[in-house]
Amino acid sequence: MIIDAHSHLWLRQDTKVDGKTIKTLKNGRSIFMDEEVQMIPPFMIDGVNSAEVFLSNMDYAQVGGAVVVQEVIDGNQNEYLQSVMERYPDRFFCMGMAFNLDEAKNVHNKGFRGIAIPGHRVHESLHTMMPMFKYMEQEGMILSMCLGEDAHQIGEMAEVIQECPELKVAIGHFGMVTTPSFKSQILLAREGKNVMIESGGITWLFNSEFYPYPSAIKSIREAADLVGMERLMWGSDYPRTITAITYKMSYDFVTKSNKLTEQEKSMFLGENAVKFYGFNNLPELPYIKNMSE
């Protein structure tokens, strides 16, 4: 069974970050930081990045479940994601957006079992969020955290892990694998027994190399040697990454590699995430042959 540990959903983008505009246009385009970009595939003409379209992609690619995280560039999607997890509880593990204790209590009361924080866009110290992290640890919630290259912030994250040893933490974007911070972020998995690393965005980070991403495979091998394959999970960063490749291509470069064993592939692509997030009642998804085959 394949589990996607890093994906996004939204109805519309309409927000500002650092004074710059992010806003849905048409034909899959958005204004992003005041620039027009192809945010999602052009066939998503209304700009709606819905659970139903994602489920169709998941079923085709035989992906049983997905973790939906949030990013401030998409605006707060708590209301929409609450409806998604109510309608599709067996397929999606949705993360709420919160930045302080009161907000964390609110999203927990709405049924969210995790909180996603784009730490690379947070300007204050992570220490200011410690009451929230303690609350999450107490309530058995999962923290999804993406970090930038800042060594000080990575050090703060290590302190959070040590202060909250029972808190489940998933470090995103595969530790910003193409940057100098890669190894120090991967090694955060050694700081606590409940810390995982997920690869959301890995195809974006190696976009210049493109499919089948041999350097991405090399980095997965390196991370496994540093912290063990049992600490690693696959993530796609859907839907932004599928403007360049298909959804299935975002993981089948792993299945086709001869640098990983079949057991390592199974752990990375799904087994670890099933255990970490507690997925159950996943559907059996048979392979459907393409008409062109």
Image: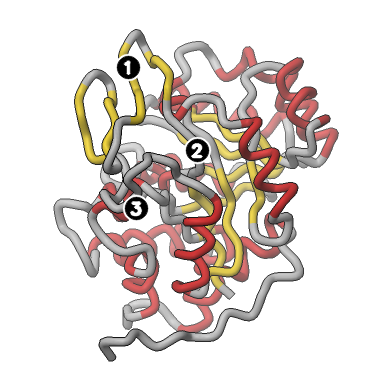
Q: Amino acid at mark 2?
A: Trp
- Residue at (71%, 27%) from the top-left corner? 133
Q: Secondary structure at mark 2?
A: loop
Quote the CA–CA distance across marks 1 and 2. Answer: 16 Å
- Residue at (59%, 69%) from the top-left corner? 64
Query: Front-most of 245 and 209?
Result: 245
Asked if residue 154 shows in the view, the reply is no
Report x, y in % for residue 257. Answer: 32, 78
Q: How many marks?
A: 3
Query: Front-most of 24 and 199?
Result: 24
Report x, y in % for residue 268. Answer: 51, 67
Q: Name the quarter where the C terminus is drawn.
A: bottom left
Which residue is disc 2 drawn over? Answer: 10
| Label 2 CA crowd tier, 10 Å (few <14, some 14–19, many 20+) | some
- The circle on residue 285 is none
Which residue is disc 3 drawn over? Answer: 202
Q: Name the quarter where the N terminus is drawn.
A: bottom right
Query: Front-most of 218 and 267?
Result: 267
Q: Amino acid at mark 3?
A: Ile
| Label 1 CA crowd tier, 10 Å (few <14, some 14–19, many 20+) | some
Report x, y in % for residue 43. Answer: 30, 53
Q: Is residue 117 left or right of residue 292?
A: right
- Residue at (57%, 19%) from the top-left corner? 126
Asked if residue 242 is positioned above or below residue 72 in the image, the reply reads below
